[in-house]
Amino acid sequence: MQRRTRGWVTVMTVLLVVAGAGGWYWWSRPREAASPFTTATVTRGNIVETVNATGTVQAVTTVQVGTQVSGSIKALYADFNSKVRQGQVIAELEPSLFQSQVEQARASLLRLQSDVERAQVESTDADAKLRRAEALAKQQLIAATDLDTARATAASAVAAVKSAAAQVVQAQASLTQAQVNLNYTVIRAPIDGVVVSRNVDVGQTVAASMQAPTLFVIAKDLAEMQVNASVDEADIGRIQSGQEVRFRVDAFPQQSFSGEVVQVRLNPVVEQNVVSYVTVIHVPNRDLLLKPGMTASVTVDVARADEVLRVPTAALRFRPTTEVLARFGETPPAQAADNAADAGVDVRLARAERGENPSAKVPRAHVWVFDGIRMHEAAVEPGVSDGALTAVEGDLTEGETIVVNAAAPERSGSAGATTSPLIPRLPGRGGAGARQGAANGGRQ
């Protein structure tokens, strides 16, 4: 029993010694120097600058088919998705009322035509009486008043003929109008296309007293569609005809459709004090996947740069603090500006003194290059940007490491308070692992 107890004590003593030695090694081992930056690598590739908008898929030509006369629907010869040809009968109104109006107008025309014939007979008789009266008046066999009466009767008969003829013309017009109204009871397709909407049923009464009701909506050609996109006024200045467009619809979230800008309409659309402009995008639809009314998420390619040097956009905004610059032996920006101002140094003059082209474009931005030991400022000219990456020209080469952001400093003693030599450290939680992960993320 005593031997077993001594064995347990020996084992526990050995474990305590090993744990103590491990703790001493953990706390006494040299620490890895922490980089205070998040870095990225200068890469070469393509950059596309885009403008995003939302639009609606529509047919290029859409015609609303209505009726110019009122009545009840007698028959329908087209339905949703029906393909129709120009002139094809697609609906018919009850024609009995209009047929009776045509018959009444025709009867009135026949009656007035007979009145014209009667007036012509009376005019011929009055003209004959006038000739006899004139002959008798020359022989002084009738009074002058009788001759005047004969002349008035003849003139009145001629006027009656003209009046009857005018009434015939009016009756003919009424007959024509009644016939046209009768023809309007037959609704025909005005274009070749597909019926995308039918708004009436058989037996329904339509009234065309104030405005023509819409019976059908016909799309001319669904193989050629267009997207009417609303572009914000801040981006409309970069939209031009001929630019390539990519868009997606909710019906096919994994498929990208392409098109081309064909028109930027000048009419502004104001909604809740937000101004936008309608941009028309032509879209081929050979497979007929796109349907009228679909919502499209549009991306317009407004600028493109191929095989250019690229840096993260955040690197153009990075400005190191005075303490960081002093740590790497660099002159703080404020002090450098003061020295240049005191010396009256001109940028172009300084270039000439260095043997460079003094008329070259003055760089508008700077990035900070870090080689692991020292850092220095490089002048660049920003170009096309897609938001995450920006094309640059200047004192940079592919593969160089640039500073994207300054990492948050670690609090002294925090590692000792939150870690133990007996608990392994997980990668990516603070220290060099976090900084290395940030650096790798920046390089992507």
Image: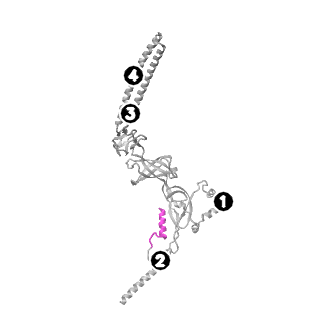
In the image, which residues are magenta? 425-444
User: For mark 4, what is the residue?
Assistant: 118
What is the distance, in whole Å, between disc 1 and disc 4 at their CAs?
114 Å
The residue located at (39%, 34%) in the rendering is: 180
User: For mark 2, what is the residue?
Assistant: 26
Amino acid type at circle 2 is: Trp
Q: Say which of marks 4 and 3 sits in front.
A: 4
Q: From the viewer's perspective, is 8 left or right of 233?
A: left
Residue 388, how many percent across, how many down?
Answer: 49, 59
Q: Examine the rendered structure and indicate whether residue 57 appears above or below residue 186.
A: below
Q: Say which of marks 3 and 1 sits in front.
A: 3
User: For mark 3, what is the residue?
Assistant: 178
Q: Which residue is nearer to you in this view: 230 or 116?
A: 116
Residue 429 in magenta stretch: yes
What is the distance, in whole Å, between disc 2 and disc 4 at their CAs?
132 Å
Amino acid type at circle 3 is: Ala
The residue located at (45%, 21%) in the rendering is: 156
Q: Is residue 220 visible?
A: no
Q: Please, what secondary structure does the residue beneath circle 4 have?
A: helix
Q: Quadrant of the N terminus?
A: bottom left
